[in-house]
Image (tube, grey):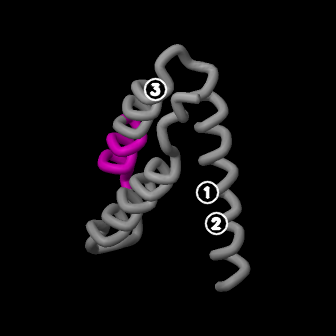
């Protein structure tokens, strides 16, 4: 289980870096990040989670993970 958690954390770091890289190339990086976060949240809300009687807990954790990923990205400094 620890190995799986480590791989998930590595994937989250990789995805965060890729999103930040793409955002930095946009004219308005904050608007891009906000729009992208909203799109990802919409996907999480609409995805079909099969095999569970109650998928609310899984969906809640997924939304929390998305919010955590995007909270790591801060606006660029004004330097």
- Which residue, as the protein is rendered here, is positioned at the far bottom? 1
Q: Which residue is mark 3?
A: 32
Give above or below for 18 relative to 3: above
Q: Which residue is mark 1?
A: 12
Q: Residues within 10 Å of mark 2 (few under 14, many from 20)?
A: few
Q: Residue at x 34, y 62 (%)?
A: 59
Q: Residue at x 37, y 53 (%)?
A: 48
Camera-side mark, 2 or 3: 3
Q: Are marks 2 and 1 in contact (CB under 8 Å)?
A: yes
Verify whether residue 46 appears in magenta.
Answer: yes
Q: Residue at x 62, y 28 (%)?
A: 22
The boundaries of the magenta stretch are 39-48
**Could you say where residue 27 lies in the image, as x and y percent from the top left?**
52, 14
Q: Residues within 10 Å of mark 1 (few under 14, many from 20)?
A: some
Give above or below for 60 relative to 15: below
Mark 3 and mark 1: Cα distance apart in space: 19 Å
Mark 2 and mark 1: Cα distance apart in space: 5 Å
């Amino acid at each position: 289980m620890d190995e799986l958690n480590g791989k998930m954390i590595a994937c989250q770091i990789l995805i965060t870096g890729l999103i930040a890289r793409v955002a930095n190339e946009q004219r308005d990086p904050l608007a891009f990040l906000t729009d992208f976060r909203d799109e990802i949240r919409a996907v999480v809300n609409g995805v079909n989670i099969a095999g569970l009687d109650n998928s609310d807990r899984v969906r809640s954790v997924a939304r929390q993970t998305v919010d955590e990923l995007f909270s790591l990205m801060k606006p660029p400094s004004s330097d």
